[in-house]
């Protein structure tokens, strides 16, 4: 029996026809099997999840969130990582559920220097930021812990 992390299809901003944010809660077995298929095409962002693949885009999104007083969830991820692929759909659905939060994904392959700056040692790694300062961190694809942390962060006073 293989261990299951949770992170499949957050990676589909320009994705074929995967319907990342539509359908079940990412729990069905076919999604899990497909997420583990290294030949399956999966993008790094979709819907409300924005892909960060340049430092300039990161700076712009962080400034935009600061000006709007928004919390940012920064997800360091890679399209080749099974845990990243399996948590993608839940992350995407959470982005839809919490429109007051900015959801970003950093492609660790495209921005290796940013991953080093943030001392990312494993993917996925999530940082929870307010006004550019770290409030919390989650390493790994624990769907329930991610949901809990996002709910807690969302309930903070503005």
Image (cartoon, rainbow, N blue to C red):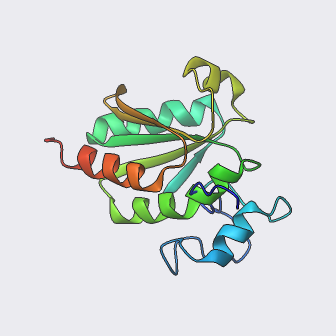
Residue 64: image location, x then y, percent: 39, 39
The reply to whether residue 55 is visible in this rendering is yes
Instruction: Mark yes or no: residue 46 visible.
Output: no
Q: Does 148 sit left or right of 30 as displayed?
A: left
Which of the image's four quarters has the N terminus?
A: bottom right
Find the residue positioned furthest to the front.
1
* Image quadrant where residue 78 sits: top right
Q: Quadrant of residue 2?
A: bottom right
Q: Residue at x 54, y 71 (%)?
A: 26
- Name the residue located 50 percent from the left edge and 30 percent from the top edge: 59
Query: Tag count in the figure?
Result: 0
Residue that appears at 40% across and 55% down: 144
Horizontal and vertical percent position of residue 71: 32, 41
Q: Quadrant of the C terminus?
A: top left
Q: Position of residue 35 (x, y in %)?
A: 70, 64
Give the residue at the far right of this rendering: 39
> Residue drawn at (77%, 49%), measured in percent from left and top?
80
104, 148: nearer the viewer: 148
Question: Quarter of the image holding residue 118?
Answer: top right
Point out residue 88 in the picture as x, y percentages from the top left corner: 58, 58
Is residue 96 left or right of 110 when viewed as pictured?
A: left
Position of residue 67 relative to residue 28, above or below, is above
Relative to 104, 35 lies left or right: right
Residue at the limit of the structure toward the bottom, as seen here: 23
In the picture, measured across the screen, residue 108 lies left or right of residue 132, that is right
């Amino acid at each position: 029996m293989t261990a299951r992390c949770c992170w499949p299809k957050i990676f589909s901003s320009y994705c074929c026809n995967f319907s990342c944010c539509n359908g079940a809660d990412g729990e069905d077995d076919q999604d899990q099997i497909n997420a583990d298929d290294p030949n399956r095409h999966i993008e790094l962002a979709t819907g409300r999840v924005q892909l960060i693949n340049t430092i300039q885009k990161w700076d712009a999104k962080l400034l935009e969130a600061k000006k709007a007083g928004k919390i940012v969830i920064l997800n360091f991820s890679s399209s080749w990582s099974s845990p990243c692929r399996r948590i993608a759909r839940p992350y995407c659905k959470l982005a839809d559920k919490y429109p007051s939060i900015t959801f970003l994904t950093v492609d660790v392959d495209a921005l290796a220097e940013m991953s080093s700056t943030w001392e990312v040692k494993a993917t996925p790694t999530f940082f929870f930021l307010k006004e550019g300062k770290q409030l919390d961190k989650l390493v790994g694809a624990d769907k329930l812990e991610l949901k809990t942390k996002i709910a807690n962060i969302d309930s903070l006073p503005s």
